[in-house]
Each structure stands twice: as structure tokens, then as C-alpha cells.
Amino acid sequence: MNPIQHHFIGQCTCLSLSPASTVLPASAPVPVPVSGAPSHSSPAPSPADKPAKSRAEQKAERRARQEADRASKQQSCSSSSKTKAPPSELNPVVKRLPEHVQVDDPAVVKRLAKKLERQQIPLRSDYGYKVSLFSHLHQYSRKAPLTQQLSIPSTVIHPSIVRLGLQYSQGIVVGSNARSVALLHAFKQVIRDYTTPPNEELARDLVNKLKPYISFLNQCRPLSASMGNAIKYIKKEISNIPSHFKEEEAKTKLQTCIDRYINENVVLAAKAISKYAIEKINLTSVILSDRTWKKFRVIVVDSRPRLEGREALRRLVQRGISCTYVLISALSYILPEVSKVFLGAHALLANGYVMSRVGTSQIALVARTFNVPVLVCCETYKFCERVQTDSFVSNELDDPDDLMVTRKGKTQLENWHDVSSLGLLNLVYDVTPPDFVDLVITDLGMIPCTSVPVVLRVKNLEQ
Amino acid sequence: MPGADKEADLTERIEAFLADLKRGGCGTGPIRGSGETARETTALLRKVTAQARWSSAGDLMEIIRKEGRRMTAAQPSETTVGNMVLRVLKIIREEYARSRGSSEETDQQESLHKLLTSGGLSEENFRQHFVHLKANVIEAINELLTELDGTTDNIAMQALEHIHSNEVIMTVGRSRTVEAFLKDAARKRKFHVIVAECAPFCQGHEMATNLSKASIETTVIADAAIFAVMSRVNKVIIGTQTVLANGGLRAVNGTHTVALAARHHSTPLIVCAPMFKLSPQFPNEEDTFHKFVSPHEVLPFTEGEILSKVNVHCPVFDYVPPELITLFISNIGGNAPSYIYRLMSELYHPEDHDL
């Protein structure tokens, strides 16, 4: 396997563990396989080399950097003498509804088709009978990837983006962290290969260049919340490039920005979260050789059709943790033995709801019935300003053929297409209400679910 | 000799039945549904009554108890077998009492009043011989068999009282009773059914294909999506393997999650269970409640490298407490879970509860 891919899939396990798994984000020995620096990028300063800095020092550093940026921006900025007032909280938010939740509106679909045609990106068509409750969402088949409709070599889309899109749609790169990191690395490659055309400014042109890539990736698989935040960050960084920068300088600056983003928000965040999480596991410590181990048992809960828990199981077994494995239907049987439930999150919404792999809300519900504490581990870059109260309005429908299973040589649902009144529903995400979740462990500390808007506000102010 | 042949035939049939029961516990569910098991058991017991040698009711009851113990030992999780044995024992007691002429108004439950006043209550030892007892008992067993034949239809007939148009109904796994129930309602009403597939055996798939063939709008979802779609569900209708004495259920795994999700959304939970599934067991017998099957269904042998280091569980049943259930629909009508204990006292005699 390509070293890049290996790195990413390694990244995703420890925390935002996609499936409904009660998994521990790593024991005391260093969890994250960090140093696999991809071969062709400029050597990123791996955190193992940096001296360990405390959180406060890092924050102070970041603030100093941002002050410097702001100062330089003000100098290069032409007219406005007044500094922009920080956006008031009470400004009416005029947001356009994203296309991927308006599939049943023909006007919206037509507008998207026209936009894609302009950008020369093929439009992906839906597959199979869609359950009426979800007619507003797309449903794609894995057997018909978007790349089949592209001409090779594609002149519009950078090859690493094409590869990335294919990896998304085939499910090779899954998990919120993995997808964001892969996206950022692909963008680094794009920036490296980019040359400013004459009479154009890098800041504006590069952003325009990125737009068709983002549409393409969106067609391959709808963007996740973390990817959206990452893209926003990149666009902001690009547009903040001062015009007097030479092309090489600008490119290096962007690449360091991206590396820093990945480092702070994914890698170091993972470490911080594991440190907090470990405090929460208060079982007898057993000294083993020269390391302190906390002795505990992990139960991994998995669900069809993705069965992502098996990967987690493999990693835990490799580390020597004693594990038990069950399917989600055996939850009521296994929960009386459990003392704590750890869940990963795909995104945390502004009203405190946790958006995560389908099945997470079920685990939280049953855990609450048995009075078992539920802890969610989530990096702050996945916090999102959307609000949602149920799992219908904004979700993702996976390939329905995945639900078919062959037992004893017989596949019951083989001909489900032929039967007109039969539909298969393969949901990817669901939302967990905040009253089921007891604590959220983030890189900023341990907060209750309802403090998400506070964190978002603090982050916005910092920026 | 015809007598010896008949006896040999009887023992052969019993052995075949026991073998079937033993084999039927392999996880994909019994080879036959519980209705057929009940009918087979009753037919066998009728044969035993007809052909075995007994002179008084007490002897007959002993013989039936012995056979019953063998049959329940073959497959303890198949409670319908035990239930039918108890029904037949109750029939024998009733017929005996009727032959003796004593009234049947006697309350079988022990009451303080009875203990103090009865004093020399004759110890019913069932030793009297009655000529027509055999014929009466066989006739009563035939009535029981007719009742068993009609249970599914009786339940299905009540469907229209409970399902209205444009409802979204959720069900779990596969239950022949619920299938008949929904198909009957679909003749007159249009509604939508969501079936949870119930891994790892995925019996929900078969249920969905059967329902969709009857032109019912069906959707199959994975177990993990049960809570996610529950907010749109109007009713949850499930079947069960056993109804326990406290009104709780022993149902296929995943049912407890469905019940909790339904309670969270205040959705009514309706259980379609014929009376022969009612068992005098209580749920607190830890070691006998759960049944496990090969974990290879959950983690297949292809994952060999981790298989030896990991514990894998594959329980078949779930316990659902009676507080989560709204209604029981059985062949004698609808009942609340709090009434189950009363129905049980009408079906079985308290002295027979431990075979």
C-alpha cells in the first residue's frame, strides 16, 4: 500500500473512530503513528522532534503569530482605517442550503448540473430505489464511480484530486480525520504544482482553481464537517497571502500553514485527548516492566454493513489489550458488564447534538438506561455551526447493495431491484441528543455537550 | 403383535421428535416455527395418552411428565414444548375433576382462608379409575389442537383494529405471526413497514421479501439505524419467542434496543404472541435465560489471527421488561402486560410449573 494511505488510515483509528464502537483512544504507550511523513512532501516537522510544549505555551505562540499576521495585513491593506468590528452575534445568518440535501427539488438539481458543466465535471447519478423518507438525499452506488465518466488524463482536475475522489467513493479512505488529512495533503500537492498564470494574482486565482476540485470531491462523496472547516481555513489562508509575496514564498508559506493545521488539530489534539481520556479510566494500575499500565478490558461493538470495528479490534489486540467483540444487537446483553462507554464523533453540532456513525445514538440510549457514563472524544476542528435535531434532514445514504448478505449460499435480497415495493436503506450518520452524552473530551479539555457554541465563539474570536 | 408395533412406533416418533428439537437449536432459528412445534408436541402427547398403559389419571400424569421432561431437556430454549405439556396436564386434571363431579369453582391458588379452613382437604392423588376418562381427555386434546391451528388466523383477524392508513410500522427480524398480521391489514389499508434486519442471522431480509411480495411498502434497515429512524415510526409490532410469567419477553436479540427506542419516542410497542407461547418461567434464572450460538456468525474464521485472542459473544435472545410493552395481542384478544399472570393461572395449574 502507498505509504500515504497507510498513514491516513492509521490516523483515523485512535479517535474519531467512525463506527459505533466503545473503543479506548489508546493506552499509555504512544498511540498515534505519527512520523510517516509522506515521501514527496517537504519534510514536515514531526511532533516527535518538537520539544513537548504545554498547551498554554502553544496558545501563546499561536496568538503571537496571529498578531504578526494581522499587523502585516493591516500594513498591506489599502483603504480602511478602521479595524473591522468583530462580527456581532446577532447578525442574521443568511445561509444557502447545501445542494446535497435538496435532491428532490428539480430547480436545484438543474442549477447544480449547469454549474458542473461549466466546471467540466461529470454529474453523478443516483442509484436504485430510494426510500421516500430520504428522497431529498443522494444515493450512489459504489460500482459506478465518478471517475468512469472522466477522460484520462483530465485537463481540469489535478490527478491527485482524482485519486482522492476515487478513494473517497470506494471507501478506501474513511473516517473524518483520515478524509481531512488526505484532503489537505492533496491540496499541498496541488499548490506545489501550481503556477500563477500571467496577469493573475495568486491569492484570487488559486482559490478559483480549487472550486472545481471541491465540486468534484463533493460529487464523489459529500463533504464532511471537518473537511468543510479545513477548506474554509485554506481558502482564508490563501486569500490572506500578501500581494507582494513571490510565488515560491507564497507556496512555501501555504504548505507550512497546512502542515501546522494538521499538526495542531489532528495530531496534537489526538495526544491531548488521550491524556484527558486516560484520567477517566480509573481502574487498578498494574506495573508491567518499566511502564505503568492501567489494566482494563475493552468491548468493541460493531455493526453491519460496514463492520469497521474489526479494524479497531485488530489494533487493540496488537497492543495487547484484552478485548471482547459483539454486534450491536447484543448490546443489552453486554452492557451490564461495562463501566464506561467511549464513542468517537464525526462532528459536534452547535446545539449540542453529536453527529456520528449510525448506531452511536442507540448505544448512548441503552447505556443511559443501564446508567453507564457515555464519553465522546472529538477534536475541536470538527465543531460545526450547523444545527440538527434528527437524523433525516441531513445525512448520507450509502450504497444500498451493501445490506445484502449471503448465508449458506443463499442471498435473500438478491433481486431487490425487481420488487417494486422493497427498498434498502443504508444510513451513514445519526445524531445523538445531548442528554445521552455525559462528557465530551476535546483537545481544549473536558466539556459538556452544550458548551459547543462557546468553543466555536472562542475559535472565531481567535481567528 | 399390533400392540408392540404401536408401542415401537410411538417410541420411534418420540425419538425423531427429540432429535429434531436438538438439531433445531443451531441459531438460524428452529427448523420449524413454534406453532408447528406446539402442534407436534400436542399430537405426540395425544398419541401417548391413547397408546400408553395407564389405569388412573395419576399414572397418565406421571407418564406425561416423564415424556415432558425428556422433551424439554432436549432443547430448553424451546419453551412451547414445555407449555404444551403443562396444558395437557391441566386438561387431565380438569377432566378428572369433571368425572368425579366436583365443582370447578375451586380457586387453585393457595389462600390463607383455604389453608385454615380446609384442614383435611382430600389429597388429590388421582387414583380413581374412570371408564370414560381416556375418551374425554383425547377429545379435550383434540380441541386444543383445533385451537392451535387457528391461532395465527385469530391474531391476524384483529389487525384492522390496530393499524390505520399511512402508518409507518417497525418490526424486528422474522415472525410468522406478525407477517400474517401485517398481510391481513394490507388487504384493506396502505401503510409502510420498516424491518430491522437483525444481524447476524439477518432473518429480517426474508420477512421483508415476503411482505413486499404482498405489495406492502417495505424498507430494510441495518440494526444500527433503529434509533435513527424511530422518530418517524408510528407503531412497533414485534413477535417473540416466549412470553414470561411477569409479562416480560424473551425475544430475538435487538428487541430490547427497539423497545427502549420506542419508549424514548413514546411509540406504542405491540407484541403479537399466541397463547401457547406463554410460559410460567420467570426471567431471573441467569444461566438458563440466555442461549448462545457459534461466534463464527459474528467474527468469521477468516479473521483467524485475532480470533484466538478475543472473546466473541453471540447471544440469541434478549430480555424485554414488561414496563416497555404496551399491548399483547393473542388469539384470545388484546391484553395489557399486567394481566398476563391471570391468563397464566387459567392455562396452567400451579403444581405443574416445575416439571
Image (spheres, grey):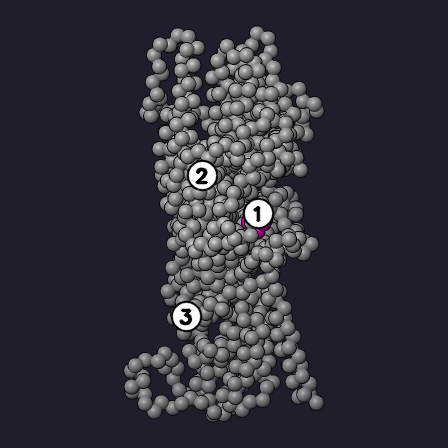
Disc 2 designates what residue?
Answer: A272
- The span picked out in magenta is A312-318
Distance from disc 3 to disc 1, alpha carbons, whole Å, reads 53 Å
Taking the view exactly as shown, the residue that stands out farthest to the front is: A290
| Residue A162: quarter of image | top right
What is the secondary structure assignment of the residue under circle 2? Answer: helix
Q: Position of residue B181 (x, y in %)?
A: 51, 57
The answer to which of marks 1 and 2 sits earlier in the sequence is 2
Q: Check the residue under mark 3 and report the chain it is in.
A: B
Instruction: Give the residue displayed 50% in from the left and 40% down from the top.
Output: A16
Distance from disc 2 to disc 3, alpha carbons, whole Å, reads 59 Å
Distance from disc 1 to disc 2, alpha carbons, whole Å, reads 20 Å
Q: Is residue B318 left or right of residue A79?
A: right
Observer-side mark, 2 or 3, equals 2
Q: Position of residue B63 (x, y in %)?
A: 55, 84
Residue A315: which numbered mark, if any?
1
Marks 2 and 3 on same chain: no
